[in-house]
Image (spheres, rainbow, N blue to C red):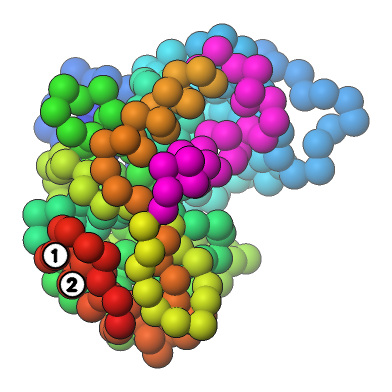
């Protein structure tokens, strides 16, 4: 058995998870094990993935990996296809599967990347390809601590302010982004999948290991200028819902799930608790230092959004 910690939870796993931080705690909040999952896929079989919610159980399937069962926020069962490499298995396990478990534990799970800038937790949201990880990596390269990549879990039930949980010290970047944001040689970084060019970049040297109050959320968009604009309350809630991890994963079926009302309540409360901004910039890696500087200035002001 292997013992790890991520998102403030102690994990006991039969599968080695080198992306996570090791732990000496043997009493686990989460158990990850292999087992046969008695769940039949619909006919015709989905092309490459399928997800199903059933009360406190969530079933997830990928054509090239196999089945996963997430139960009650405490257990993950893996039923892999024959001869699947562990590195391939870990990709959905540490993404969608872990995100589902955090959702079951009633955290608000955002599809975003997060950093700590001068003691302030900041999350970047946006559609796939908008540059969430690239923005987090750029700030990380400027000396700020990484908190989470791709899966950002927020405790919105905190008595005082919303709290962001630390994920694990890894960030996934395309080769050109790794070079532009961090000056890395992509050839020195492991591919996240044998057939995918995106790279797995360790961030152990400057990773925030404790929870931190969430102060800002930036929704990324592409435009002709570099600017930060406040979102109106209704738009802020809409963006939180649109960039929530589990609804994005499940699709329209999520509306019928038992936790859908709670999710709406969490998004509404979060939008009331802190400011959300639109961060607009041209699609240019050369401008990353300017955009990062603008974010730093905005956080330093904590009043009116900065402009460049």
What residue do we see at 63% from left, 42% from top?
A: 65
Picture quarter containing residue 303? bottom left
Q: Secondary structure at mark 1?
A: helix
Tag 2 and tag 1, C-beta contact below 8 Å: yes
Determine if residue 184 is in view: no
Mark 2 neighbour density, 10 Å: few (under 14) some (14–19) many (20 or more)? some
Give residue 133's quadrant in the image: bottom left
Q: Which image quadrant: the C terminus?
A: bottom left
Mark 1, residue position: 301
Please report the residue visible at 12 percent of the width from the left and 65 percent of the height from the top.
Answer: 300
Quadrant of the frame with the N terminus: top left
Q: Residue at x 43, y 13 (%)?
A: 72
SS of the residue under disc 2: helix
**Residue 61 falls within the magenta-colored stretch:** no
- Residue at the far right: name it: 44
The stretch of residues the image draws in magenta is 231-259
Main secondary structure of the magenta stretch: helix
Find residue 62 and report its horizontal and vertical position in percent. Answer: 67, 40
Can residue 239 be seen at all in this image of the molecule? Answer: yes
Q: Is residue 248 magenta?
A: yes
The numbered mark at residue 297 is 2
Residue 287, above or below 33: below
Give the quarter of the image for residue 274: top left
Note whether 127 is above or below 111 in the view shown: below
Q: Nearer the viewer, residue 230 or 43?
A: 230
Q: CA distance from mark 2 to mark 1?
A: 6 Å
């Amino acid at each position: 058995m292997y013992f790890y910690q991520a998102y403030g939870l102690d994990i006991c796993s039969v599968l080695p998870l080198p992306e996570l931080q090791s732990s000496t705690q043997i009493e686990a909040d989460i158990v990850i094990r292999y087992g046969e999952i008695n769940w039949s896929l619909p006919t015709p079989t989905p092309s490459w993935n399928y997800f199903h919610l059933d009360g406190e159980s969530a079933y997830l399937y990928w054509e090239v990996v196999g089945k996963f069962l997430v139960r009650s926020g405490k257990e993950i069962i893996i039923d892999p296809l024959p001869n699947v490499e562990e590195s391939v298995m870990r990709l959905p396990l540490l993404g969608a599967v872990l995100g589902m478990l955090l959702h079951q534990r009633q955290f608000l799970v955002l599809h975003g990347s997060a950093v700590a800038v001068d003691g302030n937790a900041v999350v970047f949201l946006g559609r796939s390809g908008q540059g969430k990880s690239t923005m987090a990596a750029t700030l990380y390269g400027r000396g700020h601590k990484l908190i989470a990549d791709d899966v950002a879990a927020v405790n919105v039930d905190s008595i005082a302010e919303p709290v962001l949980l630390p994920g694990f010290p890894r960030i996934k970047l395309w080769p050109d982004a790794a070079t532009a944001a961090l000056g890395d040689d992509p050839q020195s970084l492991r591919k996240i999948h044998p057939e995918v060019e995106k790279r797995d970049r360790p961030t152990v040297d400057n990773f925030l290991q404790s929870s931190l109050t969430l102060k800002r959320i930036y929704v990324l968009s592409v435009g002709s200028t570099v600017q930060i604009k406040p979102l109106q309350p209704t738009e802020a809630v809409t963006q939180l819902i649109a960039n929530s991890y589990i609804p994005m994963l499940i699709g329209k079926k999520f509306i019928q799930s038992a936790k859908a009302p709670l999710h709406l309540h969490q998004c509404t409360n979060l939008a009331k608790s802190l400011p959300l901004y639109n961060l607009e910039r041209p699609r240019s890696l050369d401008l990353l230092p300017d955009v990062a500087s603008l974010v730093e200035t905005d956080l330093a002001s904590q009043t009116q959004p900065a402009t460049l």
